[in-house]
Image (cartoon, rainbow, N blue to C red):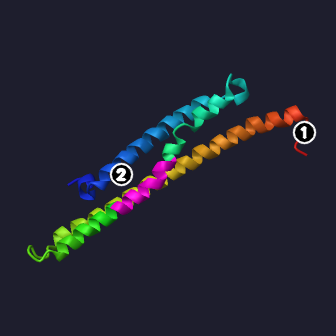
Amino acid sequence: MTLIERGGPVMILLLLASVVMTAIIIERLLIFSKKMKSPPAAVENPGRLFQELQRGLPALHTIITIAPMLGLLGTVTGLIRCFDLLGDRVQGYDPHTVSLGISEALLTTAAGLIIAVVATIFYNYFTHRLERYAREWYGDEENKTTGENGQ
């Protein structure tokens, strides 16, 4: 039985979130390495450049928010399944079946947390790098045009 099957239906949503997260991270790494080689002042439309660099970051932030919630949803559905089995007096108590519900709960929680942690690391990396890029180029340009030396 695969982890996706053992994690229940919520695991499919978590898998989808992890695929989208991975695609955004790879695409952003490629774009950042390509577009941040030259200063924004050398680009015809710096505003468009920054919009392009920010693309995908709101979706990554959404994944950071929803992945732990989906993990908790899987926890709840797994525990509901456990309690349904424990309360079913017709079939009796089957420890193996109950343990599958607990396994579902733990797997989805772990998956949601792992996805959120990875997404947070890359989201913070991208936003910090973007802010530093803007500060380096626009901050320097601002000081040059106003004649200030930062004193």
Which amino acid, by three-letter code, is at mark 1? Glu
Quadrant where the image shows the N terminus:
bottom left
Q: Residue 32 colored magenta?
A: no
Quarter assignment of residue 74: bottom left
| Residue displayed at 66% across by 31% down | 47
Q: Position of residue 80 (x, y in %)?
A: 26, 68
Q: Nearer the viewer, residue 93 or 88?
A: 88
Q: Look at mark 2 in the image and give the residue it sits on.
A: 14
Which amino acid, by three-letter code, is at mark 2? Leu
Whichever of callouts 1 and 2 sits on the residue coming sooner in the sequence is 2
Element type at mark 1: loop
Q: Look at mark 1 in the image and give the residue it sits on.
A: 148
Bin the neighbour count of mark 1 within 10 Å (Cα to Cα): few under 14, some 14-19, many 20 and up: few
- Is residue 5 visible in the rendered structure shown here? yes
Q: Range of the magenta residues?
A: 61-73
Residue placed furthest toward the left: 90
Q: Would residue 24 be found to the left or right of residue 92 on screen?
A: right
Q: Tag count in the figure?
A: 2
- Is residue 39 visible in the rendered structure shown here? no
